[in-house]
Amino acid sequence: MRQAHHPRGIVGWAIGWMFAHRPSNRQRNIWAVSLLDVQPTDRVLEIGFGPGVAVAEFAGRATRGHVFGIDHSRAMVRQAARRNAAAVRAHRVHLTHASVERLPSFGDPLDAILAVNSVGFWPDPVERLRELRRLLRPAGRIALVSQPRSPGADRDTTARAAQELQDMLTQAGFTHLRVETLDLDPPVACVLADNPSGMPA
């Protein structure tokens, strides 16, 4: 479990390869990106990008924009950089070894932020979400995705996870919350929300 949270070395590389090639993981990430309605000139950020599947999907949509990603696993940074090598060379994809509590600078405001199955690992997640809201332009979008992986997880587990994410987003000052569900086993919840003003929380 620790390797899945923070992949390292050969084992970490193997886990990343498995995540990237597991059909449900690919489907989940591509679906989540589609919900953010990314436009060609958008500037987007993924937190905890793993092997870079969603990064590649973002790069295919934000063709004149910039895709940023942070991950606290060096193994995942290397793997995602290989998967997105052409876009990295073109300076359209920027991948950084960093943690959500020590965010690098992304320059101009962001249009969209994605985090898949990572919020549960963040220290003080509401405060992290407030910090992320400050990075978004007014009306910028955020998507938090949860597919519970605990033994026996089912539709009710997913619904509870979605409610927790909604509560955190509301406390962090986001508005216009909505929940989308992908019918996998267990189901995937994506909670989407908007930055109402771009002003500090």
Image (cartoon, helix red, strand yellow):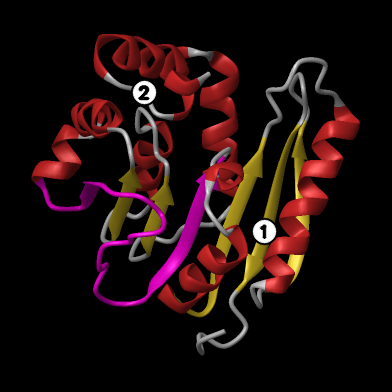
- Which residue is at a point 46% across and 78% down the rendered structure image? 134
Report which residue position mark 2 lands on: 7
In depth, the one of 111 and 72 nearer the eye is: 72
> Which amino acid, by three-letter code, is at mark 1?
Leu
Please tell me whether mark 1 sits on a helix, a strand or a loop: strand
In depth, the one of 57 and 188 nearer the eye is: 188
Residue 192: mark in rendering: 1
Structural crowding at the residue carrying mark 2, measured as other residues with C-alpha within 10 Å and reported as few (<14), some (14–19) or many (≥20): many
Residue 180 % position (x, y): 76, 47
Q: Is 109 displayed left or right of 154 in the figure? A: left
Give the quadrant of the C terminus: bottom right
Which stretch did the figure color magenta? 90-116
Residue 173 shown in magenta: no
Count of residue discs = 2
- Asked if residue 12 is positioned above or below residue 127 in the image, the reply reads above
Q: Is 193 displayed left or right of 197 in the figure? A: right
The reply to whether the C-beta atoms of the residues labelled 1 and 2 are less than 8 Å apart is no
Residue 101 shown in magenta: yes
Please tell me whether mark 2 sits on a helix, a strand or a loop: loop
